[in-house]
Amino acid sequence: MKLARESQLPLHPDVQSFLAQPQKLLIGGDWRPSASGQTFVTINPATGETLAQISKGTAQDVDLAVQAARQAFECGPWSKTLPVEREAGLNKLADLILKHSEALAQLETLEMGMPISSSRVINGEASANLVRYFAGWPTKIHGEMPSPSIADRLLYLRREPIGVFGLIIPWNYPLLITVQKLAGALACGNTCVLKPASVSCLTALYLGKLVQEAGIPAGAVNIVTGPGGDVGRALSLHPGVDKISLTGSTEVGKDIISASTSNVKQTIMELGGKAPQLVFEDCDIDRAVDGLVLGGLVNNGQDCMAGCRIYVHEKIASRVVEKLIARFQDQVVGDGMRPDTQLGPVVSETRMNAILDYIESGRREGARLVLGGNRIDGELGPGYFIEPTIFADCTDQMTIVREEIFGPVVSLLTFKDEDEAIARANDTVYGLAAGVWTNNLGRAHRVAGRLQAGTIWVNCYMELDNSMGFGGYRQSGFGRELGDDQILNYTQTKGVYIATV
Ligand code: NAP
Ligand code: MG
């Protein structure tokens, strides 16, 4: 492990002025304090210092936001926008994201620790491209005309928006996941109430200003910050919300599903994961190790797709472990605001302690710690930094192999043959993603077909294309976002029967 040495970036002037203001809620086009007048703070995880004051929304604020969204959907200006106008609004928003990408990148780095080299890409081009992807849809959404078997009838299916969406966001890719849901909802003609994760509100609030500047009418997008147990729960219970899209943990997903029975709300659940990576004896080892480093450490392992359960064929296991240790040791750790940082802090003190508890359980349950395993002290001591960590000789029942750690920790296991590897990889409550490393074409397709997960990568890892539906099997959730799937999930059909005689 090396320490980042390049100097800390100066704060962008827009970031300075944004952080100087108390952050309010966006309801019906107005920025206002929460009904209770209370606030909470977000913390810079690289230093442990307070970063910003955020309004602590309540159920009453959620109610006002849902009313504003309902009004905009049913009779406000949003209900009257033409598809070409929605397209233009979203393209304008994408332009503004690019224009403000440095501020959006710095805010995310400051608030959740992502290295600036990553947040510049994710909060710049990647977020803008995602909005543009959805900007392309409004003019292409169409219904169908089935061939009737009833005489003298004309039948058609209209594809319509669903109404008011509650969009509940996690902290690990705060802006990217926000724009994925928000642009998808708007493209289909819905309105929304957005609830950012409490440790990472700033980019969503900044985006709210860009939504206004893009000319997207008041009420189409509302933002209520505040604790999940209050704001998120109120959204899930609210009779005026038609559909909830959550990206978050399986535990919170279960709560939302229970609450959504209040008005038989639809839900989309993008939940946790514990992705296996299968490294076969016939793979290109260096290429596989590149993928293992990416899958284990991208965003500090705080990724639902983290490929942290690594099954390696026993013939190549010692070579893979050796190379992986060298690559993990090479990581440059530091404050995300230093341009050379590759691994920043984890998001919060709570998460840091949870990850350290998992590491302790690995030691206790007999896994062999071959690298890392500690909080980093010294000059990084005030922040929430954890050494990149590798456990070898793990077994399937260990807690670190079964549960989502969400930190820079990978577990290595060995296998003897393909059937065994597939069965063990599938032995999990999750099913979000999986990786396969092999140079055998038949095996690549065979294994991809047999792994139980919503996304499979072969000889690559952690790539998402906006045109590919993404989501989970089993307790990794249901419903798909991105691609045509998201358009289908964010609209509904209505059958119309016309008597022609
Ligand atoms: P989380 O704790 O489940 O929180 C997600 C969101 O739900 C936050 O906005 C949270 O608000 C809110 N929330 C909390 N309790 C709630 C309740 N009772 N009712 C309604 N909303 C509630 O997840 P996280 O820690 O932010 O993110 C990490 C998790 O997300 C991991 O499990 C990860 O695998 C998953 N994830 C999945 C995907 C995917 O696409 N499948 C992508 C990224 C992350 P507060 O912040 O105020 O608590
Ligand atoms: Mg924070």
Image (cartoon, helix red, strand yellow):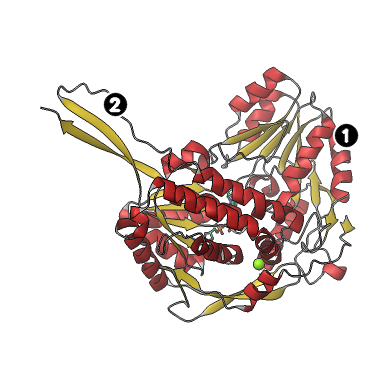
- Quarter of the image for residue 101 reads bottom right
Residue at position x 88%, y 49% from top?
330
Task: Work out whether residue 37 or residue 104 is closer to the camera in this orientation and state it.
Answer: 104
- In front here: 366 or 185? 185
Residue 220 numbered mark, or none: none
Res 429 seen here? yes
Question: Residue 364: image x %, image y %?
Answer: 76, 53
- Residue under label 1: 319
Q: Nearer the viewer, mark 2 or mark 1?
A: 2
Q: x and y percent of residue 231 in the render?
A: 46, 67
**Residue pointed to by mark 2:** 146
In this picture, is 339 found above or below 478? below
Splitting the image into four quadrants, where does ligand 2 fall? bottom right
* The one of 211 and 242 positioned closer to us in this rendering: 211
Q: Where, quadrant-wise, is the N terminus in this rendering?
A: bottom right
Say which amino acid is labelled 1: Arg
Res 248 seen here: no
**Pointer 1 local density, CA inside 10 Å: few below 14, some 14–19, many at least 20:** few
Note whether 262 is above or below 494 in the view shown: below
Q: Secondary structure at mark 2?
A: loop
Taking the view exactly as shown, the residue that stands out farthest to the bottom is 37
> At label 2, which amino acid type do we have?
Pro
Q: Identify the element where label 1 is drawn.
A: helix
**Mark positioned earlier in the residue sequence (2 or 1):** 2
244 left or right of 213 in image? left
Residue name at image x 34 percent, y 65 percent:
67
Say which quarter of the image contains residue 276.
Answer: top right
